[in-house]
Amino acid sequence: MKIIILCATLDLKKPYSATPFLLQWFKAFYDEGHQLFIIPYSGKSVKSDWWKSYPNPNYAKGEFLEKIMKLSGHKPGKKNMPFVSNLAQIFAKPGLEKQIRKILEEEKEISAIINMGLPLNQLKGLPKDLKKDYPIPIFFFDDDLPTSLPENGGFTFNFYKGADLSEYDSFIITSEGSKSRLLEMGANNVEFVHIGIDPDEYAPIPTEKDIDIFFFGHNGNSRKKYVDMMITEPSNFLSYNFKVGGRDYSMDLGKAKYFSPKLSFDEWKQYSCRAKINLNVVHELHAETFATSTARPFELAAMGCCIVSSPYKGIEKWFEPKKEILIANNSKEAIELYQMLMDDAELREKIGSAAQKRVTNEHTARHRIRQIVKLIQKYGDNLDEKTNNSYS
């Protein structure tokens, strides 16, 4: 199967937290025998044996716009900037459309186009224009829900505002609790494909367990309720070594040691494997929206880490509580779980091993790609029936 991917970036230096797991998915497409033709929207093209990458047609314009946004004090998700989507419609959309049409003409037999996170309102009209000449399914993949919804502002842009959701054949999302809102806003269809990871990227690292309790995650202020419950209060009560890292922790962390706003991917894996207990402290909005999958529990589980999570609606869909992951519903339960686990290394290893096995059997990137391929086949067949035509 040949698929065109429009992705936010292929550049790991860009501040998009989804990039590492998306790159794993792109590799999984290759491992499953499919061909990807990728156009980045931000940053430079990145060559790979796993995909064919086309140049970012708006690279210079994008770099210039990023500088303007920094100078204007733009903070992702905090301040709507209507002029950005207007400028993109005028200057970015035409170049991107030209690049897509070039691939469609050169490669032939493209099965689908998937927009993986490019702002909807910046590309309004693009799917409709393409469909006039190429009857293939066009999907939008959103792994930022429910944060990306207009009422929540988004991580980077408020990109649903002014968008036409009906242009896409279906939305593929990682948040089951967000489906009704997307349908309400005009989406034709909504399908679920949850986070999956490449186990090869998360092989356990043999190392001394010299950290008692560890958590690393950005946007700490959006987790405040659970940070208080899982870290601040227990660290004041217990004598264990708590380490916390990431951006935006302006709250009291008790006796926990805040040590870094930034870690490389390899450094983060080292710290996680050094910890006796790893915490999954979820953004409150994600935790309270049913079955919103996030990368962290899958990543930690793949490394065989023992995980204690804050409350998380729907987590039982992916991991069995008490066997593969432990859930603390309040600070008292967190303290009790930490004490139990710190006293029982064998139990920690048993829970970590069970979680690792679950990921390997059910939650890899290749599992998720198989789901996406089935959706492409489903919507492609539907289009063929409606149009009695096929693109080749």
Image (cartoon, rainbow, N blue to C red):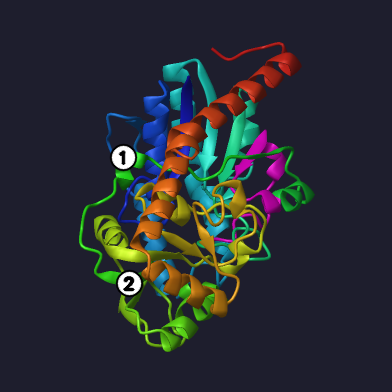
Residue tagged 2: 212
Picture coordinates of residue 213 (x, y %)? 36, 71
Q: Nearer the viewer, residue 64 or 146?
A: 146
Q: Which residue is mark 1?
A: 200
- Element assignment for label 1: helix
Q: Earlier in the sequence, mark 1 or mark 2?
A: 1
Report the Cα–Cα distance between label 1 and label 2: 26 Å
Q: Quadrant of residue 380?
A: top right
Crowding at dot 2, Cα within 10 Å, few <14 / some 14-19 / many 20+, comes out as some
On the picture, is 121 further left or further right than 58?
right
Which secondary structure, mark 2? strand
Could you tell me which residue is drawn at 46 percent across and 35 percent down? Answer: 361
Pinpoint residue 334: horizontal percent, then vertical percent: 51, 74
- Mark yes or no: residue 20 visible: yes
Q: Quadrant of residue 83?
A: bottom right
Residue interval drawn in magenta: 157-178
- Residue nearest the viewer, comparing 169 with 348: 348
